[in-house]
Image (tube, rainbow, N blue to C red):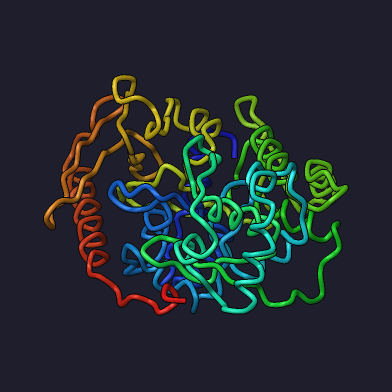
Amino acid sequence: MSTLAAWRDFAVARSLFCEPDLRKALERLGFVQADPIRAPARAQDLILRQRVVGYRAGDLEAGFADLGLAEEMLHVYGFLPKEAVRLLHPRRRASTWQVEADHPHLRRAILTHLRLHGPTHPRRLSALLGSSAVVNAWGGQSAATTRMLEALQVEGRIEVVAREAGTRVYGLPAPRRCELSPARRAEGLVLLLTHLYAPVPEVSLRRILATAGARGPHGVDLREVLDRQLRRGRLCRDTVDGVAYVWPDGDPRPKAVPERVSLLAPFDPIVWDRRRFEHLWGWRYRFEAYTPAARRVLGYYALPLLWRSEVIGWANLTYRLGTLHAEVGYVGRAPRGASFRRALDEELSRMEQFLAMGSAPAPAPSLATR
């Protein structure tokens, strides 16, 4: 592939697949980033609606227990098949959290409660063990019990067993058997992350591996594992326009990209790496939900607008009283011709249907009362 257009086709075609089954789509992706903001839906739902036939907002949360999934911190927080958890644990934390120093009793108290009473909602733990507040990772305030639950989850001492209205319900994991060696875990992590974002700039991939490696197998540098995988030919590398890209060996050559508009989540694998985004599409996309309103350029939760294999603009969406409202912006001019207008209308209609189907309340699980 010698042109940027060919690399754009490759990046879109290998990631934007369509599966009839949610579990198969998750296995094919390997990892889906989670984010709590709904504008108009959570990032994980926006990512999956592009890849699962008939997907509705909330399907991932509703089917979590039956899908064989785990919630874990990889390089960012998200969902992955439970089999992949073997790549993550046992692992270390880079430092002690402040909640452990301020509330040293909570660790044992939480583990004892979960062992005796089973899966428990954080509100129940807070009521039983105290509602002291601590500073969380974002600089805000969280209950000390919630923060300790997060620390124990990162260690693998507890796991998310369900979600109730978006809130994690925690329990003890089943005993882990047949732990992989640190070397095998490291190889698996490098392949998983390369697969997720490929073709990915090598500079970006090394940064991702450094982040994941901080919690990875002890004594193993994931960037050195990357070098070995490149030498052995399990990963491929090529340069276009002065940028070295990496992707898994055996990836099929891209097929023709359909004439379709897709509104992507800010954390969709296609647009996740901002370095690749700017190189392939030639403009600067930024996630501005945490940017002061007066300084925003694209909008609070601008969704990149993909037309064929070109990201040509963005859209800010709101869903009120069963109706979708869209504000669409373009890097240059909107494409002329009826085909784009029709494709955009079809995507907005799909989005409205996706949100409408996901708005019906689901039966409440029973775990919250424990």
115 and 195: which one is in front?
115
Seen from the viewer's position, the closer of residues 196 and 216 is 216
Residue 3's spot in the image, x, y percent?
Answer: 54, 33
Front-lying residue, 95 or 346: 95
Residue at the location (47% across, 66% down)?
124
Q: Quadrant of residue 48?
A: bottom left
What residue is drawn where x is 34% and y is 34%? 312
Above or below, 61 against 279 in this view is below
Q: Residue 245: x and y, percent?
A: 65, 38
- Residue 112, position in %: x, y? 66, 71
* Residue 70 located left or right of residue 186: left
Question: What is the tally of numbered marks visible in this picture?
Answer: 0
The quarter of the rendered structure image containing the N terminus is top right
Q: Give how far across and how far down residue 13 sits, in percent.
A: 48, 52
Extreme-top residue of the structure: 295
Q: Residue at x 30, y 77 (%)?
A: 363
Note whether 184 is above or below 284 in the view shown. Answer: below
Residue at left offset 45%, top offset 71%: 22
